[in-house]
Image (spheres, rainbow, N blue to C red):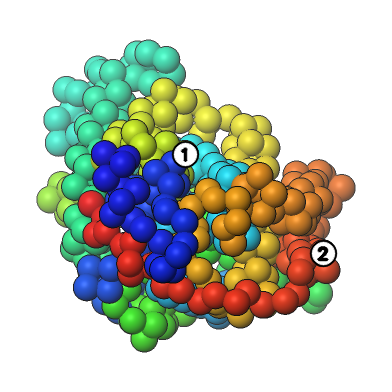
Amino acid sequence: MAAVQDQTAANAADDGPATSSGLYSRDLAPTKKEGRRWSAYNVFTLWGNDVHSLGNYAFAIGLFALGLSVWHILLAFAVASVLLFLLLTLSGYMGHKTGVPFPVMSRIAFGIKGAQIPAVVRGLVAIAWFGIQTYLASSVLSTLAKAISPGLSGLDDNSVLGLSTLGWITFLALWAVQVLIVSYGMELIRKYMAFAAPTILITMCALAIWMFLRADGSIALSTGHAPTGWDMWGEVLKSAALWVVIYGTFVLNFCDFTRSAKSRTAIVRGNLLGIPLNMLFFAGIVVVLSGAQFKLNGEILTSPEDVVRTIPNLFLLTVASLALIALTIAVNLMANFVAPIYALVNLFPRTLTFRRAGLVSAVIGLVILPWNLYDNPTVVNYFLGGLGALLGPVFGVVMADYWLIRKTRVNVPALYTDDRQGEYFYRRGVNLRAIASFVPAAAVAVVVALAPFFDALSGFSWFIGAALSAVTYLAVSDRRPPLHDVDGESIAVASD
């Protein structure tokens, strides 16, 4: 099979070296133009699902608990959405032009072997969160199961490796559903998101209206304990920065999706509807849910699950719970499943396909017992927080290299060859200048993110790391633009 791939995937240059089977597979190949099916609506549904995740609601509701008023929360999300629109559009353009997934994109700056570093970091973060998000969805399913059949409560009283029997049943059920969807590839993921997004938007909007009516048509605008003056504006900016940090993972591997976008216009329109407009819609739902609940009884929500559990009608409770579960599955598929799949395929292109890598990712997400990770704040804050802080420096290097040094000129076929004269071979397959820019910036970002002394700046660690790595990379790199700008059509094979 490898020999066939080598012959099929010859370099675009007439006298160029052959593509290496150790760097190429059907899933890593550039997406053909005729195989690009993602419209503006598909890009929008990606954000329509991801923005409304349970974790995002918990974060946003937490801003109300901190004392920020409704107007300050809306302002924080407005600032964050503008920043994300710009960052994600730039990142999305890279995927559309080259047609390659993130691990291959990383080869441009880090080298054909050095690219394993950012790909593995991104994949580790995603696998951990895949397990955690599946666990959160299984908790909703367990609650629904007990509401429908109270006799199942007896299965929720024991503990096996930290999870009850009912918890294991619901977790494994949702785990299997996600593995099944992924086994059919990116096309089924696209279709699932197209179905799930409107379902989620309608459900959450209906939930907000129901809460608004329960509160007699008005909401509390704050908890009455809001910071004032510069402290207030500091919290607004920090909240906006943290919201961008949450999407630091997606900013990196957005090209995994936009490599299948029909046009740049589709990316811009999808991002415009899905980020600024959809995020403000999301913020509006958050302030209505939080403000209505606080007006009703002076309590502060922790997540939409708190509202769902109060629904008195079993049918409506079932619909709302299933919507939240469908939402979490959609978020997992695009944010926490695709990235590790491509990272694993990139590591073992000769043996792993998209389907096999999906199963490996899912098994790892299971054996780490993610509920124990989630219930341990130290692990979440230091392990996942530390890994997350590394993503900013990776972004800084990749973007500085692509936009400022190469001026978007990329020799795509050269990304798949291990010839020593190849454009991205650098030194033994590693661009030492990229590593030298990444390592110190990553160290600074991790310290700022985790050290108590830098608590005031912790929310900005992603930006600090990205800026430091980009500036350093520009200072140490060869500023001469590349001579080649070659697409990947000659080696493109439609991905599974």
Number of residues whose C-alpha sits closer than 10 Å to that of mark 1, classed few (under 14), some (14–19) or many (20 or more): some
What numbered label is drawn on residue 476?
A: 2
Which x, y percent locates residue 48? 34, 68
Nearer to me, 127 or 135: 127
- Establish if 54 lies above or below 475: above
Image height of 418 relative to 164, above or below = below
- Tell me the residue at 43%/47% (across/down): 20
Where residue 187 sits: x, y (%)?
A: 21, 58
Quick one: SS at disc 2?
helix
User: Residue 293 is drawn in which quadrant?
Assistant: bottom left
- Looking at the image, residue 193 sits to the left or right of residue 485; the answer is left
Q: Is residue 331 above or below residue 151?
A: below
Label drawn at residue 466? none
Structural crowding at the residue carrying mark 2, measured as other residues with C-alpha within 10 Å and reported as few (<14), some (14–19) or many (≥20):
few
The N terminus lies in which quarter of the figure? top left
- Dot 1 corresponds to which residue? 347
Question: Could you tell me residue 350's position as x and y percent?
Answer: 36, 37
Mark 1: which amino acid?
Leu
Q: Residue at x 46, y 25 (%)?
A: 368
Q: Is label 1 in a helix, a strand or a loop?
A: helix
Q: Residue at x 57, y 57 (%)?
A: 422
Which is more N-terminal, label 2 or label 1? 1
